[in-house]
Image (cartoon, helix red, strand yellow):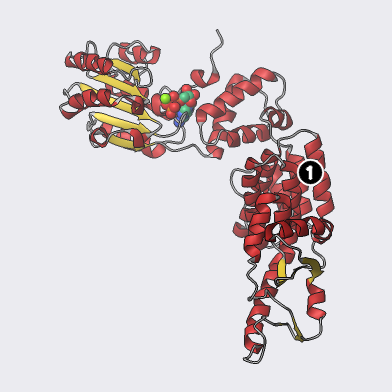
Amino acid sequence: MYLALARKYRPQNFLEVIGQDAIIKTLHNAIQNDRIHHAYLFCGVRGIGKTSLARIMAKSINCQNGPTITPCQECACCKEITAGNSLDVIEIDGASNNLVDDVRELREQVKFLPTASKYKIIIIDEVHMLSKAAFNALLKTLEEPPAHVIFIFATTEAHKIPVTILSRCQKYDFRKISGPVLFNHLKDISAKENIKIEDGALQLIAQCATGSVRDAVSLLDQAFGIHHDQLTEAKVRELLGLADRVIVQEVFKSIVTQDLSESLKLLEETDQRGLDLKLFAETLLRQFRNLILVKSTGGAPVDLSPAEVGFLNELKNTPDVSLLLTQYQILLATIRELALSEYQKTILEIAFVKLHQAQNMMALTDLVSLVKNKGQNVRNADQPVRAQGTVGQSDRPVDLTDSKSPIDWYQLVRWITKEKPPLGGLLKDVIPVTVSDHEIKIAVAPDSQSRGLLIERGPAIQDLIEKNLGRKINFLVTDLKDEKKKPSA
Ligand SMILES: Nc1ncnc2c1ncn2[C@@H]1O[C@H](COP(=O)(O)OP(=O)(O)O)[C@@H](O)[C@H]1O
Ligand SMILES: [Mg+2]
Ligand SMILES: [Zn+2]
């Protein structure tokens, strides 16, 4: 009979449990000092060892050579617990036994002494699923527990457990398992099972499992079930529906080396291949995270494969961390947008423009604050309300937003973004040079990658603005450089 790997590799003793060292240490202390509590609560997400440890704990307590942290696995008690047919270890699934009657029956059962072992151990899984009445019935036993009874509760949702129960339990918060620990575990199982799989593929599975051992092992099981031959990283990536790492790396490289047309070309290719663009963007986001960590720590994050580290090292001399952080934020916002919209490719295209523009925008932001500060210095009582400023050494003013106009530029951009997200996206980072009742003029850096798009989509933007205002208005796109050159007003 085929036994699912996750079941086959259920840990049978403390040593086989991965990633829960702190909890195991505390449990060991309790067993060794004979200070076993009468009620334990194991909390945490699915597949990280709660049920497994509950059973191991039961074995440790009831082993005929125990209590011991190394149950013999040979005595009748150990064997029965492993086989799941010990009369003294009662396992209840809270999800299917939430009736008061079941808990009442349980209360009857705990009155009897254990048949063959020291304790009656009651394991209630998914205990938060019990009804309120069932909890109340349970509480009666918990308040005055017979000396021969130990409860071990497990739950994925500790907050749903009444305080009256919580306060009578020793609570253990199980941790998600880190990528490298999962990787080693998978590698171990693959070797034992004679599964030929590339490290990169194991790394991917470990990442996708997001901390759950059971998910990681099941994914490995699935992958092996589909491709019995050599499991390559590419095959597993495809199986998991992930974007090809190579293409994501190429896109990432094109972004950090400021090659927008290459980025757009690769995006087109990715889209043509029918890959999930949100996943693609998420994988790209990870590249930013990786490079940011590499550049700010000087070392590589532990969850990267040697191939990935090599790739990042090639990019070490590219943009500084503050720009990467800005780009990370832009991409993160884009991923949220992608989840809500069906225009995924358009959104990503504009996001790429923004990513390329980010460098210019950072310089521009500095420039604008300089302009604003200087503007305040040179303004005096004789000057009109319209703010004026100078840039750098040249004494040429730049008109900033007309403070008299009731038009709120940023509110307008928000509205446009709601109506036509791609157009709004284009406007997010431009500088409003003039916003008056009859004219709106925006500026972009002359080398800005979105300049062409802005000019091309200008009429569409104007239409939208006019729709919002309910009247005609002049709409102009200019270069910031030209604004600076203008003669003084
Ligand atoms: N910490 C762990 N160490 C080793 N294997 C684990 C661990 N946690 C889960 N597993 C694997 O996942 C399966 C289910 O684990 P289980 O203990 O039932 O998780 P939980 O009760 O937290 O949902 C086990 O059979 C085992 O294969
Ligand atoms: Mg469980
Ligand atoms: Zn034993």
> Residue 413's quadrant in the figure?
bottom right
Front residue of 366/86: it is 366
Task: Identify whether 34 is placed above or below 97.
Answer: below
- Lateral position of residue 484 relative to residue 103, left or right: right
> Residue 296's quadrant in the figure?
bottom right
Residue shown at 60% from the left, 34% from the top: 208
- Lateral position of residue 6 relative to residue 487, left or right: left
Q: Is residue 235 visible?
A: yes
In the rendered image, which residue does mark 1 sit on? 267
Quadrant for ligand 3 reads: top left
Front residue of 388/475: it is 475
Residue 52, given in percent of the width and then of the height, sits at: 41, 24
Residue shown at 66% from the left, 83% from the top: 375
Residue 109, given in percent of the width and then of the height, sits at: 21, 13
Front residue of 125/181: it is 125
- Lateral position of residue 436 relative to residue 55, left or right: right
Front residue of 135/117: it is 135
